[in-house]
Image (tube, grey):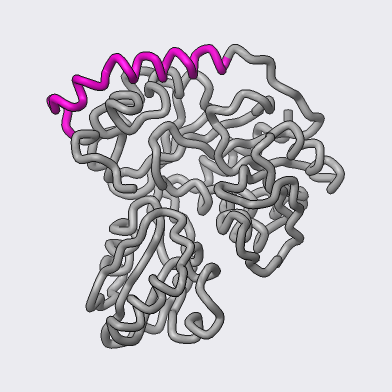
Amino acid sequence: MKAPLFWNKEHSLWGLFFIPFGMLFAFGNFLRQKKKSFEIPVPVFCIGNIVVGGSGKTPTALYLADIFSQKAKKVVYLNHGYKSERQNVVLQKGSVFQQGLSEEAFLLAQKAETVINSNRKEGALTALKLSPDILIMDDGFQNPSLQKDFSILVFDGHKGIGNGRILPAGPLRESLKSGLKRAQAVLILGEDETSLSLKIQKINPKMPVFLGQIRPSFPFKKKEEYIAFAGIGRPSKFFDMLKENGFNLKKEISFSDHCPYTSKEIKFLKSLGKNFITTEKDYIKLPKDFQKQVDVVPISILFQEERRFENLVLKEIKK
């Protein structure tokens, strides 16, 4: 599903109409946060957001593991397994994608062992059996069942917080103010087109705000023309990244987030031509025979203040 246009319009009638429903949603989240959290004996880092849709949480979680691995710390990921048909699954490092399980989990598993479980407490107990030094939660910021030691809120610099209203009146899971109360840092990926950093500083001047860009992780051989496709939170972000890095795109095809890529989608793509390019998240779900026709672009995060960010998160594990 695509986000409604009024989510980005401050004075939309639909946005105003849904405000009472947003207040109920916010109250429900307020009550939810009152629940007691389960605490485990290793640091828990949460990569979350307060805006629905993709923001760059998974690349951030992968980047965080690199920081800790440089300090010889063993990381285990906890993933809620969006649309996963099985729960409490442990993916070994380097696991090959299996249908019916979360694609994000398999991307994380290329870096470290990953536990899939929508029940954060059960997932954490399973993760502890793997003897981690650090547990990283990919998503789950609004879920209070597991005690978090350090939470990073990730935002898409292009979208910001939209009209600033709470679901269904806007794109927020909770208000910016309430989210910042439980976060220890903010990361804005892409150009800060909505001046979100200023809004954050007005609410909490002491909140560490970092800016970063998502970039291809290594020099890429660019062909004459590509048909780019993606089924992520905001496919246009992927297309824009390609064009900014010199890729020549013949067509841009957007699918729904978490698209399963059935024979229908594959047949449609094949009818468009050749020379395809897509994201890692999409690539792992493609049939093996079609993967041979598709180039995949690994990505990484380029920080403006990389050292400052690393020092901040490393300080937490020294406590």
Identified at 24% across, 40% down, the residue is 4
Is 29 inside the magenta-drawn segment? Answer: yes
Identified at 63% across, 67% down, the residue is 97
User: In the rendering, at what x and y percent does residue 311 appear?
Assistant: 59, 39
In this view, the residue in front, 105 or 215, is 105
Q: Work out whether residue 217 can be spotted.
A: no
Residue sitting at the far front: 264
Q: How many marks?
A: 0
**In this picture, residue 158 sits left or right of residue 124:** left
Identified at 81% across, 42% down, the residue is 126
In this view, the residue in front, 112 or 253, is 253
Write down the quadrant of residue 270 in the picture: bottom left
Considering only vertical position in the picture, is 106 above or below 11? below
Q: Is the magenta stretch mostly helix, strand or loop?
A: helix
**In this picture, residue 211 sits left or right of residue 311:** left
Q: Work out whether residue 90 can be spotted.
A: yes
Quadrant housing the C terminus: top right
Write down the quadrant of residue 279 in the picture: bottom left
**In this picture, residue 162 sits left or right of residue 97:** left
**In this picture, residue 250 sits left or right of residue 89:** left
Identified at 61% across, 47% down, the residue is 81
Is 18 inside the magenta-drawn segment? Answer: yes
User: In the rendering, at what x and y percent does residue 79 appear?
Assistant: 63, 45
User: In the rendering, at what x and y percent does residue 205 appear?
Assistant: 39, 20
In this view, the residue in front, 32 or 306, is 32
Considering only vertical position in the picture, is 214 above or below 20? below
In this view, the residue in front, 225 or 189, is 225
Q: Magenta segment range?
A: 9-33
User: In the rendering, at what x and y percent does residue 100 appear?
Assistant: 61, 59
